[in-house]
Amino acid sequence: MIFRTSTISCLLLMAFSQLSAQEKYELNSGWQCSSVAGIKATGQQISDPAYRLSDWTPATVPGTVLTTLLDNKQVPDPMYGMNNEKIPDIYHVGRDHYTYWFVKDFTEKPVTGDAQVWLHFRGVNDGCDIFLNGHKITPSTHFGAYLRQSYNITPWLAKSGKNRLAVIVYPPVFPGNPNGGQGGDGTIAKNVGPQYTAGWDWIQPMRDRNTGIWDKVTIEKTGAVRIKDPHVITRVPGIRKSDGPQAPATILVSADLENASTKSITGTLRYKIEGGMATQKVTLAPHSTTTVQLPDLLLKQPSLWWPAGYGPQHLYHMQLQFLNNGNTDDTEDVEFGVREIQTYWNTHTRSREIAVNGQKIFIKGGNWITSDAMFRFSKERYDAEVRFHRDMNLNLIRIWGGSLTERPEFFEACDKYGLLVFQDFWMSGDCNGRWQDPLKKEDQWTRRQYPDNHSLFLESVADQVKLLRNYPSLAFWCGGNEITPPADIFHAMKDSIIPALDGTRYFFDYSNSDSMSYNALGGNGDGPYGIQSVPYFWSYRTFPFNSEVGSVGTGDYESLERFLPAENMVTPNPQTGKTDAVWDYHKYIAYNKSIDPYGKTTDLKEWANKAQLVNYDQYRALMEGFSAHMWDWYTGVIIWKTQNPWTALRGQMYDYYLDPNACLYGSRKGAAPLHVMYDPTDGMVMAVNNTFNYARDLMLELKAYDMKGRDSLLTQLFVEVGPATVQKFMSLKGVLDKLSEKEGVFFSLRLLNTKKEIVDENLYWLADAGGNYSGLQKMPAADVKVTAHKAGADSIVVTISNPAGGPVAFFNRLSLVDAQTKKRILPVFYSDNYISVLPGEQKSVSISGAAVATHSTAQVEVYGNNVKRLAVSF
């Protein structure tokens, strides 16, 4: 994370003299826009503050053209129903329809002496020309959705201090035909930009192809010398533990210094951290940029950064400062983590093995597209989504190649929550020619050379590496999704650009390449996708580091009604599994064969609740099946996929509105760091330990409960599980088959410490001899008591008590709702959900998040399979 003097600590401010009146601020309000249609004036004329903006429209910046149109109610919400079909598509109406002028008036007085004022754009899709106060700032039209822009606007500031910025934004040159293919007809990939905007199997096309000033615009004031693109590398030798004393680590720092003045300048670049200081004196030629390497600094007793589940995520704050004749020309603050990532080839699994600070990490990941299909990003939304991934007990997020290099705010959240990041570049096997495809306009040989502008692609790669390389969460670069870039691009990236500008991260040729996971099984090297039987995840040996494997993800009734019109809130046909056109439009994958064992239904609310049982079982089984074969069959797995940037009915642990479904909590259970589990194929009870420490003196307690809540103790014994291992205990298949044959049974597994506290627990609902959950369909009601109380300004603790003598209180969904509307408050975070409470026991769940603090009239709603819906206040 990079930020300026306004955010540094008082101690650092006292340590160094400051640049006088240094500022950096965002131009994020007060913009106006107009379509180019009917605008005859030139950019020089429009950017003159005297030019009247008659009938111009308030604009959303950062944002796309479609976002501005939506915010002004000029188009319907493309997330809802089939509204997207009512919005003109750029391919049919032409690029001029989405070519817009954006204008911003701002106050900035001319500076004196050697002071400089800079204008920065962090992302414009796809081309633009920029004008300020009657002057064209761009030497030629800028292209590249990902390529940052910086301009020295010092000479063009108005004497009055009243300035006008005018930007004309051009859509991608090749918007592509949204013909239903993955990336439409594929020509969207001729640009250097996002491919999904032409449509995919989990999204409909974004009609403007995300044209706009989609990322931040900032003004920055410095002295004659500006610090650019600092680079921090940390070396952490040896095998480390996450606690206890640490051997030293080494910090290596460099930065680019740009001298904007007409004279040679001699000064000092320096930083201070943990009582140590590194300095480097340098002479800078006029109008030049120089890379300066500071002396290495030894950090004693470092606090290390670890992935989630393995240790804390400690972050350091460093301030770089350039001193010129006793004055501070510029400062740049960098937040970083002390960690080192290693990779090895595991010859047993024949796949890539990952280590952090010398300790091997079993990768449990999720595939990510982008936060919002229309690029409506916010720090708060990023934080919530990444936190959900941490709450799933995942430790890696892969950024899929048909989208973008994610924003700094995303990486800040990953740094905070301990999610490693696997960053693809902007290629896909679908658009870039891996497969023959009749929906593509051009043949594979032609598509294999996309994009048209290779030099722009490489320039964008270099720029994004500089932008993101300091984040400790960033772990890997990848050439593209399921395909390498064209040969010249590929070799320049792998052999030159990334080694020179980073040099610390492994580069995967493509997302499912043999360098990641030797594909001895044939096929594409990933999958399967869609619902599988629970035993499948345990018994079928897939690829040893699977970059994409996943299942379904439909939300419950409350989720569906947010984007499906009332007339489309209908149950999928119980015979054929088919739905109506709106469900199909939102990419529904049929559940019915998996829901049928819970009982056929024509009631959508009941159907959606049963879908959550399937969701939970699918993702618990997926994570347990891979973990059970850790270091034997597998070194990692990445779920396809964990989130949707659009209101799709598949592949998500929470919906577009940040409402979690049971997939999240099934994954959370199955991926727990220390976890006891049951293999349905052979009845084996086992535990996996995904930590660095021995798990000793644990009591394994195994019980069965019938549908009336009567329990049978099957066994209990003291066990231990070594670090990073799987320990098998016993098979109970015959016993459990017998107990479940009539109407199914609950199987409870627990690990207890010597204080009889639960360290981990798991509850399976096993089907009857016919494969149906007949007992669940006729369970007696559980007479639970629910209480809730505030545990802090932004947290609530909810306790569900189930009296002895009754049945299991099964599969209870907790929701924080508005007391008046009964609508869920989003986003909030549950320490667990879809929980079951055994007879005579109670369970507590914490609900936390900023939304808790801001809703004074909230209630907690609870309902379950055999628990009636109720709401409690606190």
Image (cartoon, rainbow, N blue to C red):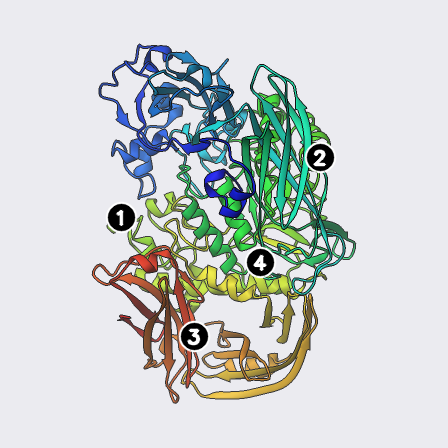
Using the image, determine if residue 177 lies above or below residue 76: above
Q: Secondary structure at mark 4?
A: loop
- Name the residue furthest left: 820
Check if mark 3's residue and mark 1's residue have beta carbons within 8 Å: no
Q: Earlier in the sequence, mark 1 or mark 2?
A: 2
Q: According to the image, label 3 marks what residue? A: 836
Q: Secondary structure at mark 1?
A: loop
- Compared across the picture, whether 800 is left or right of 343 comes to left
Check if mark 3's residue and mark 2's residue have beta carbons within 8 Å: no
Q: Which residue shows up at 53% across the image and 31% down it?
A: 438
| Rendering coords of residue 644 (x, y %) | 44, 47
Disc ID at residue 565: 1
Q: Is residue 267 visible?
A: yes
| Rendering coords of residue 573 (x, y %) | 35, 56
Q: Which residue shows up at 51% across the image and 77% down it?
A: 769
Q: According to the image, label 4 marks what residue? A: 308
Q: Is residue 557 visible?
A: no
| Rendering coords of residue 430 (x, y %) | 56, 35
Using the image, determine if residue 354 lies above or below residue 873: above
Q: Amino acid at mark 4?
A: Ala
Measured Cα–Cα span from mark 1 to mark 2: 52 Å
Check if mark 1's residue and mark 2's residue have beta carbons within 8 Å: no
Q: According to the image, label 2 marks what residue? A: 499
* Screen quadrant of the C terminus: bottom left
Q: Earlier in the sequence, mark 3 or mark 1?
A: 1
Q: Secondary structure at mark 3?
A: strand
